[in-house]
Amino acid sequence: MDNITLSMLEYDKLKESLREYAVSYAGRMHIEDLAPGARLRVIEAALTETAEAKEMLDKGASIPLPSLEGIDRIVSLLHTGYLFTEQDFSAVQTFLHSCSQLIKYMASKREIAPTVSSYALSMKELGRLKSEIERCIRFGKVDDQASRQLEKVRKKIAVVKERIQKKMSSIMSRHGSILQEHLVSVRGGRYVLPVKREYHKQVKGAVLGQSTSGQTVFVEPEEIALLQTELGMLEADEAREEAVVLGQLTGLLEDSSSDLLLNIDITGNYDFIFAKAKYGRSIGGRTVQLNDEGWIRLRGAKHPLMLKKMVPLQLEMGKGYRSLIITGPNTGGKTVALKTLGLLTLMVQSGLLVPVEEGSVFAVFGQVMTAIGDGQSIEQSLSTFSAQIRRLTAMVEAANRSTLLLIDELAAGTDPGEGMSLSIAILEELNDRGAMMMVTTHFNELKGFASRTLGFQNARMEFDVESLAPLYRLTIGESGQSYAIEIATKLGMPSGIIGRSRQIFQSHKPQLYGPEMKMDLKVETDTDARTESEPDTETGVQTDIDTQSEAQTNTNTEIKMGADSLKLGPEQREQSHETGMAAEDEPMAKPRRLEVGDAVFVSSLQRMGVVYQEEDAKGMVGVMIQKQKLKINQKRLKLYIEKGNLYPEDYDYDIIFESKENRKKSKLMQRKHVEGLSIIRKPEDN
């Protein structure tokens, strides 16, 4: 899975939550390396082990996971020449003791957790290393019994210390009156007496220091100097013997390093598995059925970060249709539906339990790709639309039958007509490549596309208009609406604006008819709403209802073109482009004479146009295609929609066919005579 998908679906946040349940550095390392897999059998095994671990926890079992406290440091120093300390061996001994406990514990759980318990069979108890550490190290120190030579040296040290204590007691009793305190102090590892400064010459010996105030002088009595020298030599012998013991243990530890590392790895894996199980319990997760045939069935699915807010999602894909086109209002939960399916899929393919109900089924994908929001454009500093197009291009390149694509607001942020056309072309290509898709959109035309195209299905997100609350309830087989006007009404938009918006919407929305989804291109122009303002043909700015009608006509013409192409499969579409749809060149039976305003199909160009000039003596008809006027032989034209079904009876065709400048001149000339004012038309306009 690519990083954009993981980021868009908040996979890192999921791993952060999972990391909280790990208790060792090794377990956290496994979580850090966690990524969705793509092999069905491997994923099934990972889910099985997580489910078994959860069952063990559900039965109230306390798992004796070995402590890895300090072990990471020890591992890093193996075979470096480092002499391990008593504290290091104490940590190893504690770890090995816990490993023995875990091995015994897992042996007793083979019936309820055959997979998880089997991992402990590979662990080594390392009995010799463990027993040697226990024999040589006690209470964090090298024990007297670690070696015979060490035992002899320590006995001599004890004898010398006892003689020093007796000598010091005798000296203190003789000089008690001049001592600052009646106790023996140690300076630099040698025994001294705390003598008052003014009397320090009364004690024969060496001055080894004084107090901060200078009132006390620490004197080593001459009578014990030789004994202290002997003690120092014996303590050096002791340190050498301890180093010998630690060296022997270090060698034994390094000889066992491969088994030790294996135990550490298995312990980390156990920590990882039980962290997955603990997290699964916290979100109400369960294991699911898997397949590699593209079948998805979600029952009561929830996004793990929205457990308390989200209405459970019901969803099915892969049987009868492989792709969903979801419509509905903004804030209606469409994006949540995408993210829920996407993240749960990644979780399942990571061996994690997911918050769904019994009977849920997930497909395993080789690639999951998302185009959600504008987060993917941050690095490139691109617009949302540009970023999405780049992302969609990558999707087209990667798409195959093992790809799940999640696309939010397909081709939004651009001209609706072009965006819709681009959307259909992209979906056709992705569908031809076999990808499974969930796509959200506000384009009404895509509802028709989904209803008539094999492999697609409509769906809508339910929305409570009264409370303006998304219900996150997905209904498959039905298309939704945006509720933009209803939302604006609830949020206090002035009633005049609301009323006018409803009027415009009813006048200009495309009509959908039954399963054929035939596009009605009739534009019901509100003549009372016409103004003197004109459309700017250079900038494309729509300034009045007439201009909207013109734009709507052009857009809907293109929509029908796209809709017709949807009836063809990929091979037929390709063939039609190559042959130029020669069948359309055949003359129609009893053709009706074309009139100005008729919508026609131009077979040679595979485009729709509007007749601006009737047939001449040579059989040539004037047709305007996207504001370009052409003369085309009537044999190449086919009546598509009569003008009466497109425009009102008194419709002014100059709005479509004349330039802005000529229309302004015409209006002036109708009002009054203007000296020198004339309208000059190009030859093809006559």
Image: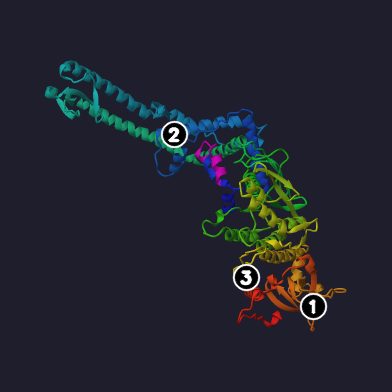
SS assignment at label 2: helix
Whole-angstrom CA distance, mark 2 to mark 3, is 85 Å
Q: Is residue 449 above or below residue 112?
A: below
Q: Is residue 382 above or below residue 18?
A: below
Residue 634: mark in rendering: 1
Q: Is residue 158 above or below residue 646?
A: above
Amino acid type shown at disc 1: Gln
Q: Does 19 lie within the magenta span?
A: yes
Residue at screen point 29% across, 22% down: 159
Q: Earlier in the sequence, mark 1 or mark 3?
A: 3
Residue 461 located left or right of residue 144: right
Q: Which residue is mark 2?
A: 89
Viewer-closest of 436 and 226: 436
Q: Does 228 lie within the magenta span?
A: no
Residue 633 located left or right of residue 421: right
What's the magenta region? Answer: 12-26
Residue ranking furthest to the front: 672
Q: Earlier in the sequence, mark 2 or mark 3?
A: 2
- Quadrant location of the C terminus in the rendered image: bottom right
SS assignment at label 1: helix
